Image (cartoon, coloured by chain):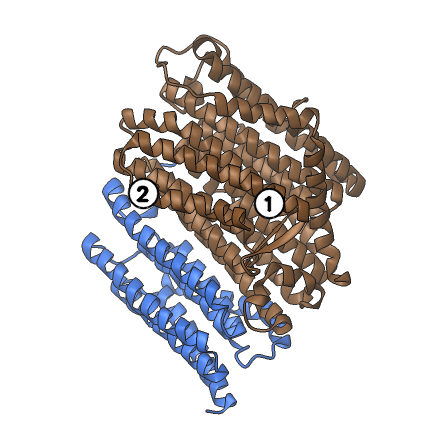
Chain colours: A brown, B blue
């Protein structure tokens, strides 16, 4: 599994190297090179894994199957395009004096370390190591959120740090409880924390302990997913950090937390044999959708507004995973993909828009299409895509989600539909005046790199028009794994 | 030593652990908070060593040494440096008065014993009684975080929660695997360093370590709080 090692180590090596390089242009190039190489390695890895379905790497410490290798490829892809985007963006910030060279170095280095933490978390076969790597990815981004050292950004980073630290501590307590019962079955040692072995013995775990453990894991990882009512950190962290960081927080870090939550749910389902975990997830999902849809309308800052849209979509995915059928898991995985693509694309666009207008206040951003047609159209298309307009992929996944909800819990379609409509109204209420109308006087020309944005949107469009066979097969494999993993306890 | 004796020792240590958690909540002077925090760290290390001896688990000895160095010495020393450099010896004024805090803490402890009951029944480990106390300590640490205004006391609360989690891991499962424990210790260390860094940034930016002063900057017009 040399490809696996290459995928995992290239961001680590890149991150260490970038910590030593002071030259901004060179560092940006190395950052892109690291992103591209990680993506290429992960793609080769994905092809290998798809052939053999699932495989252990490095003596069982890592485990790759359809579910996580798909997320690895998604993570490295968005990571790569973010490095491409961040080159000109950070150069503008450097020229504008918002960061100095030392902090730019910190930015590049921490960005790659964050990627390393993400990949470690996805591929690890150990529930404890997953926790450690999620914490690592969080710590790396805390420093990135406070990169500008403005009072608001420091306050946001502190809030992020304390709330997520608290959440993740609860998740650790849940993990201790899992180990508490699994160590009586699998013995003291790493075996009792190994996912593959835990799934095989899920039915032997004590249901009472696993239920309590899931409550802690749900609140703990749920905080990191950004589910209401534990979402207070998310808009601040997204709003105050540099835009490339908002893009990867929204598009990637939330996915890792949700991935951890779903893995835990699969285990708890196997142990309890009930739908308890799924129902809790559905409840949190619906609540997040409602809170986010309503909060959207009250925003004044463009990045904060789109971060509430992220809460909305994470709520949808949590809900879909909670339903727990093959169809709903398929929908959730597809939604995860298109949301990551579209949302990071939107944040790239928003970053450029804020630079061009010199502000993040929505009331002062006007006439983007006249002034910067690329940015204006990008924002309009992105918003249409994220709001769930056909023919974009978000529409497809939301449609599938509705079908799945209608099959299993018909009454939930009403709050779902209502939430989506309210959120859509909120998005367009703010976006329309920003893209149309007369340009504001304070607009300045910026060096824009819209290529990553269009690539993201084009992919989301392609996924909406026709999902390629290999990808559909991949999702099916992963969805089947999520569902059967939950019920394998009895059989295995 | 007999198993019963070790069992009693761990139970005694658990009681002391609960005592430190209450003491942390009751203290008003920074220095005393730090002293109690250091005492809690040492207590953890002793517990790990006792359990290691009782179960012949050599990995736990490593954890014990690590805990002593990190939580008994290094972290309290770092925090002590911070309060000395930033001159925050002053009294911390909690949001609730001490009597009320103690009463709430009492309720929280009873609640913890209540929710852990089903777990205690099935445990065959010699240290099972400590699980409820560890849960209580986790909740007490959180109580400390939400009732204090200073950023430093919030961090001590955070680290106290971390300590209680570690205590739960030793007390209820005879320790997590070493790899995981090293990972957690590493994360705590990094977190503490970032905290330290933040204290200075916060002080330089806000002229105070009060959390309220910071939150005032997060206005942006939405009234979600």
Classify 10 Å Cα crowding around label 2: few (below 14), some (14-19), many (20 and above): some
Q: Is residue B128 above or below residue A346?
A: below
Distance from the alpha carbon under mark 1 to that under mark 2: 28 Å
Residue A193 located left or right of residue A467:
left
Q: Is residue A463 above or below residue A117?
A: above
Task: Look at 34% across and 47% down and name the residue there.
Answer: B211
Callout count = 2
Residue B99 is situated, as x and y percent measured from the top left of the image, at 39, 65
Same-subunit check for callouts 1 and 2: yes
Task: Look at 40% across and 11% down and name the residue there.
Answer: A440
Q: Chain of mark 2?
A: A
Say which label, 1 or 2, has the lower sequence index. Answer: 2
Classify 10 Å Cα crowding around label 1: few (below 14), some (14-19), many (20 and above): many
Residue A431 is situated, as x and y percent measured from the top left of the image, at 52, 19
Q: Which residue is mark 1?
A: A69
Residue B153 located left or right of residue B167:
left
Q: Nearer the viewer, residue A179 or A228?
A: A179
Checking the image for residue A86, the label placed there is none
- Which image quarter holds the C terminus of chain A? bottom right
Residue A99 is situated, as x and y percent measured from the top left of the image, at 29, 32
Asked whether residue A146 appears in the rendered view, the answer is no
Checking the image for residue A19, the label placed there is 2
């Amino acid at each position: 599994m040399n490809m696996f090692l290459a995928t995992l180590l290239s961001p680590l090596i890149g991150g260490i190297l970038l910590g030593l390089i002071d030259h901004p242009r060179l560092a940006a190039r190395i950052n892109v090179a690291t992103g591209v190489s990680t993506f290429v390695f992960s793609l080769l890895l994905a092809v290998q894994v798809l052939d053999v379905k699932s495989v252990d790497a490095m003596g069982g410490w890592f485990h790759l199957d359809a579910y996580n290798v798909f997320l690895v490829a998604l993570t490295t892809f968005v990571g790569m395009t973010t490095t491409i985007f961040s080159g000109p963006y950070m150069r503008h910030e450097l020229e504008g004096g918002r960061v100095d060279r030392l902090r730019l170095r910190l930015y590049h280095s921490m960005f790659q370390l964050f990627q390393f933490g993400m990949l470690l978390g996805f591929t690890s076969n150990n529930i404890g190591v997953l926790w450690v790597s999620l914490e690592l990815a969080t710590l790396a981004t805390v420093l990135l959120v406070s990169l500008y050292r403005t009072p608001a950004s420091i306050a946001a980073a502190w809030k992020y740090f304390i709330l997520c630290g608290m959440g993740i501590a609860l998740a650790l307590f849940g993990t201790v409880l899992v180990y508490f019962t699994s160590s009586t079955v699998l013995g003291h040692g790493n075996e009792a924390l190994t996912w593959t072995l835990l799934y095989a013995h899920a039915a032997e775990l004590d249901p009472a302990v696993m239920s309590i453990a899931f409550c802690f894991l749900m609140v703990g990882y749920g905080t990191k997913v950004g589910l209401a009512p534990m979402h207070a950190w998310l808009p601040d962290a997204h709003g105050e950090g540099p835009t490339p960081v908002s893009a990867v927080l929204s598009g990637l870090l939330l996915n890792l937390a949700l991935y951890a939550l779903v893995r835990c749910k699969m285990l708890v389902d196997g142990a309890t044999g009930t739908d308890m975990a799924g129902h809790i997830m559905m409840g949190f999902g619906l609540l997040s959708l409602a809170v986010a849809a309503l909060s959207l309308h009250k925003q004044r800052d463009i990045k904060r507004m789109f971060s509430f849209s992220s809460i909305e979509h994470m709520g949808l995915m949590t809900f879909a995973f909670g339903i727990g059928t093959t169809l709903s898991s398929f929908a959730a995985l597809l939604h995860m993909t298109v949301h990551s693509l579209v949302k990071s694309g939107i944040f790239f666009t928003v970053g450029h828009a804020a630079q061009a207008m010199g502000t993040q206040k929505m009331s002062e951003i006007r006439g983007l299409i006249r002034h910067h047609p690329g940015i204006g159209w990008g924002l309009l298309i992105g918003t249409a895509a994220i709001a769930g307009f056909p023919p974009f992929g978000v529409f497809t996944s939301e449609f599938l989600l509705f079908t799945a909800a209608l099959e299993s819990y018909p009454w939930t379609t009403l709050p779902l539909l209502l939430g989506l409509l309210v959120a859509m109204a909120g998005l367009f209420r703010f976006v329309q005046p920003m893209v149309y109308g007369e340009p504001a006087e304070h607009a300045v020309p910026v060096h824009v790199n819209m290529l990553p944005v269009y690539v993201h949107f084009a992919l989301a469009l392609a996924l909406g028009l026709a999902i390629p066979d290999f990808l559909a097969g991949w999702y099916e494999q992963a969805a089947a794994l999520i569902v059967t993993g939950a019920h394998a306890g009895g059989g295995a | 030593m007999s198993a019963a004796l070790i069992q009693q020792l761990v139970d005694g240590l658990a009681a002391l652990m609960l005592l430190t958690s209450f003491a942390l909540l009751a203290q008003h002077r920074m220095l005393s908070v730090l002293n109690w925090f250091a005492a809690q760290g040492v207590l953890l290390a002793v517990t790990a060593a006792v359990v290691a001896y009782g179960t012949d688990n050599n990995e736990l000895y490593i954890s014990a040494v690590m805990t002593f160095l990190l939580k008994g010495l290094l972290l309290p020393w770092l925090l002590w440096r911070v309060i000395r450099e930033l001159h925050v010896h002053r009294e911390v004024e909690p949001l609730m008065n001490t009597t009320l805090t103690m009463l709430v803490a009492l309720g929280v402890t009873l609640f913890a014993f209540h929710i852990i009951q089903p777990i205690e029944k099935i445990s065959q480990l010699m240290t099972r009684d400590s699980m409820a106390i560890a849960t209580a300590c986790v909740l007490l640490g959180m109580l400390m975080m939400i009732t204090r205004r200073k950023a430093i006391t919030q961090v001590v609360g955070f680290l106290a929660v971390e300590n209680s989690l570690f205590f739960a891991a030793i007390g209820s499962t005879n320790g997590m695997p070493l790899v995981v424990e090293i990972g957690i210790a590493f994360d705590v260390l990094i977190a503490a360093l970032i905290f330290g860094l933040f204290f200075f940034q916060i002080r330089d930016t806000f002229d105070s370590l009060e959390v309220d002063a910071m939150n005032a900057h997060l206005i942006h017009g939405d009234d979600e709080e």
